[in-house]
Amino acid sequence: MRPTLAGLMALGRFPQRYFPRACLSFTVIPGTSKADVSAEGLRFLDSREIVGPIPVMISELMVALRRNVRVSSKVEGAFRIDRPEYPETAVREAVANALMHRDYSPDGCTSQVQVTMYDDRIEILSPGGLCRAMTVDRLGELGVSFPRNQALANILRATSYAEGFAEVGSVVENKGTGYFQIRASLREANMSEPVAIDHITAFEVALYKAGVGAEAGRFGFGLGERAGGGGRGGVWLPEGAAGGKIVRSVTEWSDETGRFHIIHVLAPGTVECDIVDFLEEAPAPVSSRILMDALGKSKATISRALNRLMDKSLVERLGPSRGPGAVYRLVQ
């Protein structure tokens, strides 16, 4: 007798002894892009590698998440209700799905599941795209489940979370309800639909904060309000982004998916949106000092916002990369 990979990942004490990259990474980025740094020059506000069997990794991830999310309190009657900025059900189900459905082949085991927390969203990236008959359009259909790892799914359905953590009950239901629960919990929290992207070698889900305008998914894979197009490609606006400011729409071509559109949407009231509004009215390129004075923001806040806009190719810098001679304008 010998243990199987599914048995080790669900029930083993330290499966990473045999599969070092079959783990979970959690990173907190001080901005909306991996290029952002904090005012103190830090690239990561929190970064850790989480190991152990799948039930423990999920619970440890939730512990790390609770340390980094903001919690708002509301008094209803005689009780105070705390609401984290991301519904725990949505994050937990998304991470459980990523760990269960990821690619555990020899090639797939060279990469870990990644959970990255930005200022405006949480992204969950798992090795291996959707498999079998599952497509992005079918995600969230009750009763539809095509697990890549049937043995692992069966074990996790009968496995409870480890003692000592807040999570209780079975790790998964394996009845095709996981993505439905993600969408339902986000909707209950007045948050936009999850944005799902099925890459060739990975599957990505992004959960956006309430009131934040999300960018439409590349190749039109966003699960939201359809804005036009059909068949291959098309244009999609994630639900909740309709009230944002559409800054730029770019049409490109892919041999895999045909014509697709990338739409940049900025949430009203954000520094990025205010900068774009100001640059639209400015008769000439402006310096960061002018933006600081006009918007009443600090140098660090303006610099981070400009970097995010330049990462999205919405704003370009003219002149030297450093110093007082640099000015900014909208990309035409």
Image: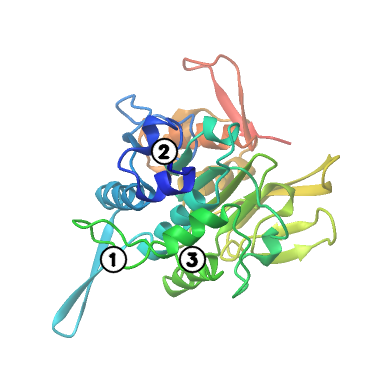
In the rendered image, which quarter contains the N terminus? Answer: top left
Residue 182 - label: 3
Other residues around mark 3 within 10 Å, as few (<14) / some (14–19) / many (≥20): many
How far across and how far down the image is residue 105, in percent?
59, 38
Residue 187, can we see it?
A: yes
State whether residue 139 is above or below residue 294. below
Looking at the image, is mark 3 or mark 2 nearer the viewer?
2
Q: Circle 1 sits on which residue?
A: 168
**What's the CA distance linking mark 1 and mark 3?**
17 Å
Q: Nearer the viewer, residue 219 or 147?
A: 147
Residue 317 quadrant? top right
Badge 2, how many Cα within 10 Å: few under 14, some, many 20+? many
- To which residue does mark 2 refer? 23
Note whether 127 is above or below 183 in the view shown: above
Across and down, in percent, residue 139 comes to 63, 64
Q: Residue at x 26, y 50 (%)?
A: 63
Which residue lies most toward the left here? Answer: 78
